């Protein structure tokens, strides 16, 4: 899988409705994963979206999620740029350069869903997410 770059939008509890709307507008395939499916089944956020991805016939990719518990939703600051794929060396290289001189919110390390993931804000104030999946062999 080639690495991809796309917007990642944070929502204030209405990610499902928003991503379903974007699917109506743009077409394509929508995959939604809830916090409950990811180990938080007994929490008030169980039905909220932990990760959603819309892939369209035009080649667009849009990702989004409800703001996780403990994080503040900030309108206007509710986006990140996402880099994802299975080329670990390439993506780690991007991470090193993007996080240099910036701030790391989530270190680039293995997460509960099995991927290596990190979040940082670059030296220009742009938030980035890097997700490395295992190469499909």
Image: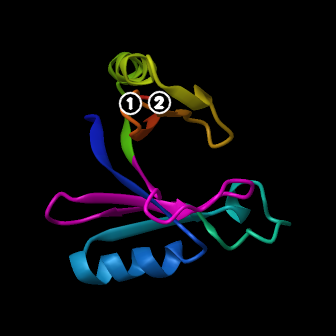
One can see residue 33 in this view: yes
Along the viewing direction, whichever of 133 and 50 lies nearer the viewer: 50
Does label 1 or label 2 sit earlier along the sequence?
1
Does residue 135 lie above or below 114 as drawn? above
Q: What residue is disc 2 on?
A: 134
Q: Do tag 1 and tag 2 residues touch (Cβ < 8 Å)?
A: yes
Where are the magenta residues, as a range?
A: 51-80
Residue 18 picture location, percent across and down:
43, 78
Residue 28 picture location, percent across and down:
27, 71
Q: What residue is disc 1 on?
A: 86
| Residue at far left of view | 58
Along the viewing direction, whichever of 31 and 16 lies nearer the viewer: 16
Is 65 part of what is drawn in magenta? yes
Residue plotted at (28% across, 42% down): 5
Instruction: Work out how far the residue at label 1 is from the one at label 2, CA to CA, in angstroms.
Output: 6 Å
Residue 96 picture location, percent across and down:
42, 16
One can see residue 52 in this view: no
């Amino acid at each position: 899988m080639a690495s991809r770059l796309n917007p990642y939008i944070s929502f204030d509890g209405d990610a499902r409705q928003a991503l379903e709307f974007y699917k109506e507008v743009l077409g394509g395939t929508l995959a939604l994963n809830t916090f409950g499916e990811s180990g938080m089944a007994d929490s008030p956020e169980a039905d909220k979206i932990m990760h959603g991805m819309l892939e369209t016939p035009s080649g667009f990719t849009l990702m989004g999620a409800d703001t996780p518990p403990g994080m503040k939703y900030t309108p206007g600051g509710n986006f990140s740029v996402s880099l994802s794929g299975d080329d670990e060396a390439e993506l780690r290289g991007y991470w090193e350069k993007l996080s240099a001189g910036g701030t790391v919110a989530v270190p680039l390390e293995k997460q509960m869903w099995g991927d290596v993931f990190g979040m940082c804000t670059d030296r220009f104030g742009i938030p980035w997410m890097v997700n490395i999946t295992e190469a499909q062999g």
